[in-house]
Amino acid sequence: LTGPSDFGDIYPIVTKWTEFPKRSARRGDILITVKGSGVGKINVMDADELVISRQLMAIRPSGIDARFLYLFLDHRYQYFQSVATGAAIPGISRENVLDLSILLPPLPEQQRIVAILDEAFEGLALATANAEKNLKNAQDLFASYLNSVFLRTLGTSSELPLEELTEVRSPITYGVVKP
């Protein structure tokens, strides 16, 4: 895995192979992009073991619910973006990640919080899908109404060239220079 270009919504997608592995991540590790334009993007390893480039850091949860840590790091994306340095290739340091403080409730409370957030995300996804469907329906309804208005007036209207009804103040050209 070389960076966020290999990231899916949650899990990475393997697109490259190497015969000279240096660093690897294991199933359950949280991957965070530490170099490049995707600084702070995260994914979770779902393969047994994969090689990772130096653009990525693998964080292995220990003593914390993995999903709780994932959600915390995902929530810190803007922080990672804000501390990234380097004009051509922005990056964050190991310390930028490891020095983060997290309020750590007991494990059962972490799991309860994750369950609440998962339910909220599901509700948000459903609401978003419904809103998109409603917008599409409204656009279709408007287009249908507009079409019916024009069709109804066809029989009672006269047809005139647009130039008789308008005055053009500045010509529109698309890449053509007129003498």
Image: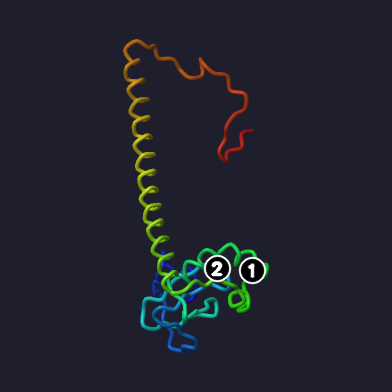
Give the image location of residue 49, x and y in percent: 39, 84
Nearer the observer, 47 or 157: 47
C-alpha gap between disc 1 and disc 2? 9 Å
Position of residue 109 relative to residue 20, above or below, is: above
Query: Secondary structure under badge 2?
Result: loop
Amino acid residing under circle 2: Gly
Position of residue 114 relative to residue 97, above or below, is: above
Give the image location of residue 145, x and y in percent: 35, 25
In percent of the image, x 39 and y 43: which residue is there?
131
Instruction: Assess whether mark 2 and mark 1 are in contact (beta carbons under 8 angstroms).
Output: yes
Give the image location of residue 86, x and y in percent: 67, 70
Q: In terms of image quadrants, where is residue 147?
A: top left
Give the image location of residue 77, x and y in percent: 55, 64
Image mark for residue 28? none
Of labels 1 and 2, earlier in sequence is 2
- Find disc 1 in the rendering and name its residue: 84
Quadrant (top left/top right/bottom left/bottom right) for the C terminus: top right
Position of residue 78 relative to residue 146, above or below, is: below
Horizontally, residue 19 falls left or right of residue 172, namely: left
Amino acid residing under circle 1: Ala
- Find disc 2 in the rendering and name its residue: 40
What is the tally of numbered marks visible in this picture? 2
In percent of the image, x 35 and y 20: which residue is there?
149
Pointer 1: residues within 10 angstroms few (<14), some, or many (20+)? Answer: many
